[in-house]
Structure formats: C-alpha cells, structure tokens
Image: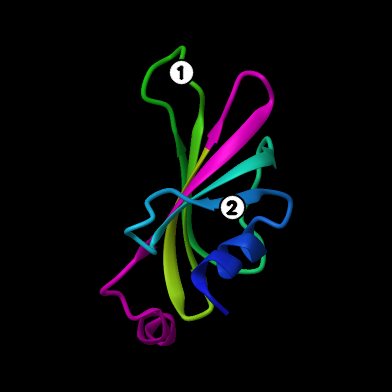
Amino acid sequence: MNLQETVALMFPHGVVTQTMPDSDSIFEVHEIPENTVPQNCAVLASGEFQYFRDQDRTSSFLVHAEDHVFCIRVHSAHSGGSHAEVILRYGFDPVKKLREH
C-alpha cells in the first residue's frame, strides 16, 4: 500500500491530495467533518492548541499506521468544515518504540 492510500484509510471521509509533488511525505486531507480523529491507526499521542483566542482550534496527533509514523494537524474552521495536514515522520522506528512500552 502506498503512502497516499494509507492516509486515505486514516481519513475515509476526506479527499487526500499530495501538497508537494517533489515530496512523497506531505499530504492534505479536505472535506472531513469537524472534530475528525484519524482512524485505522494507533494514536501514539494527541493534543489541542490554539495560537490566538480568535483563531480556530487545532488538534494534533502522532499516529502509527502501516509501519510508518505520521504527524497530523487537523484544523477546524468556524464554518464547520475541517482539513488535515499529514506529514510522514522519518528516522523513527515505531515497531521498536512500541515494543519498549
């Protein structure tokens, strides 16, 4: 399974696009429902933050899927829609780390 298919499994209701054609590790997912949480993966860590009081809330996730680790930010919009930025993290051995815990 390629990386774009893996991201599509994590966001089955979204539309996955590759944001940088030269980089096969950065994706965006559009048309996802508000408060979306990645699916079909192991969530290693999660949190929420807001840079400014009047700015939209952002959720972040570190997930393990298909022997890869992804850093995900889900941006919620006031209009009720959301989009996600998904970045593949290199240099991390998730199988080794999961066995240690």
Identify the residue position indicated by label 1 in the image: 55
Residue 36's x, y, as percent? Answer: 65, 45
Residue lying furthest top: 54
Residue at position x 51%, y 23% in the image: 56
Q: Which residue does the image show at 66% across and 30% down from the upper left?
A: 81
Q: Which is more toward the observer, 31 or 69?
A: 31
> Circle 1: is it few (<14), some (14-19), or many (20+) Cα within 10 Å?
few
SS type, badge 2 = strand
Depth order, front residue of 49/9: 9
Determine which quarter of the picture holds residue 23.
Answer: bottom left
Please name the residue shown 46% across and 18% down the image: 55
Residue at point 37%, 51% (across, down): 20
- Do the residues under discs 2 and 1 have CB atoms within 8 angstroms? no
Q: Amino acid at mark 2?
A: Val
Tell me if 91 is positioned left or right of 101 in this view: left
Q: Secondary structure at mark 1?
A: loop
> What amino acid is labelled 1 in the image?
Gln
- Name the residue beneath numbered marker 2: 16
Residue 22 occupies quadrant? bottom left
Please state if 94 lies on the left or on the right of 5 as rendered: left
Q: What is the total number of numbered labels drawn onto the structure image? A: 2
Q: Which range of residues does the magenta coloring cover?
A: 75-101
- Name the residue nearer the viewer: 9 or 47: 9
* Labelled disc at residue 87: none
Q: From what the image shows, is residue 74 above or below residue 61?
A: above
